[in-house]
Image (tube, helix red, strand yellow):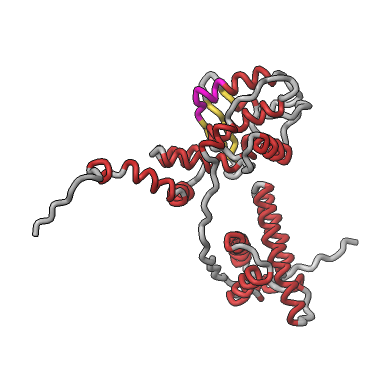
Amino acid sequence: MKKMQLQLSSDEMTIEKGGEKYLKYIKITNRTPKTIKYYEGCLRSFSSYLQYKKEISNDEREPTNVLCSDVNEDMILDYIEYLQDIRKISDITVNSYLRGLRALFYWFAKKGYCKKIMFQLIKQDEPMKETFTNEELDRLLKKPKITKENFVEYRTWVMTSFFLATGSRISAVLNLKLENIDLKEDDIYLYNTKKRKYQIIPITTKLHNILSEYISIRGQQETDYLFCNQFGYQLRLRSAEDCIKDYNLARGVTKSSAHLYRHTFAKIWVLNDRDLFTLQKMLGHTTLDMVKKYVQLFGPDLKIKNNQFNPLDMFVTNNEKIQLNL
């Protein structure tokens, strides 16, 4: 005999059960594993807040029994205070959790589990995007000798060149296969894991030469992935990050994040007055919002450039004497 399943009514749906349903929903709607992991983290964070509230208020009710309909705007404000004062996390991370929770409760409201709740993000200072200096790039882009013993260094140099030439995310680059590199037409078919679609990136002359040589030296391996390990299998993210860190340190560069090449690519593009719409396409952004942020964030560099090329400074010399008409 089948065990009877109790069906919770809309106003009896707990956050725990509702969260499980939401995670199931985003999985079957084909969201990326990274997105799923993000929402799992948002749920865990809110659950830790509910556990904290239980402990300080001596509430007998378990956090797992808190209903979706119990949550209101005052509780969200209290949650923000908990994140800031108790967990001591940054404003950027607070807003990240709030965005995830906002999407979750928007879905709850659509399902009738609760009323619509307003989520107000907190004001945050936008940090400067760290980039590589010209001196650091000179060190990182110096080609190593090609031998069997230093394949890892050579491969990392090729990856470094690829990052700087395309501004691509490391996750997308590691998923590139040989079939995605069209050296005849000089196109790269890069799968954007965030948007779940391909974008076409043009190959420059220098990158063409680098990739041609690398593919020839790489030869036939166990995998079709462009960047493989020493045993011929796909290079994993953690291994790639460790290789980049070791490679950079060996060349006297302490910065090691592959994402810095993306920031550097955007910075050089902006400072050279290149088309922002093309930059948007190259970086795979849906809108110009992030591109506009890059323009704002590189303010000090733009100030230097403004001093060099400002129309007033170009036409008025320093030794020009000003005549006053009294």
The residue lying at 84 percent from left, 66 percent from top is 4
Residue 217 can be seen in this image = yes
Q: Nearer the viewer, residue 143 or 13?
A: 143
The residue lying at 60 percent from left, 44 percent from top is 194
Q: Nearer the viewer, residue 93 or 41?
A: 93
Task: Please say if 151 is above or below 96.
Answer: above
Res. 161 image quadrant: top right
> Which span of residues is magenta-colored?
202-209
Q: Is residue 203 magenta?
A: yes
Q: Is residue 106 magenta?
A: no
Point out residue 105 in the picture as x, y percentages from the top left corner. 61, 65
| Predominant SS of the magenta segment | helix
Q: Nearer the viewer, residue 96 or 60?
A: 96
Q: Is residue 117 left or right of residue 239?
A: left
Total labels drawn? 0
The residue lying at 67 percent from left, 48 percent from top is 34
Point out residue 39 in the picture as x, y percentages from the top left corner. 67, 57
Res. 227 image quadrant: top right
Going by the picture, which residue comes out furthest to the right? Answer: 1
Quick one: quadrant of the C terminus?
Answer: bottom left
Res. 25 image quadrant: bottom right
The residue lying at 69 percent from left, 64 percent from top is 45
Q: Is residue 213 left or right of residue 44?
A: left
Point out residue 110 in the picture as x, y percentages from the top left corner. 59, 64
Going by the picture, which residue comes out furthest to the left? Answer: 326
Point out residue 101 in the picture as x, y percentages from the top left corner. 62, 63
Quick one: quadrant of the N terminus?
Answer: bottom right
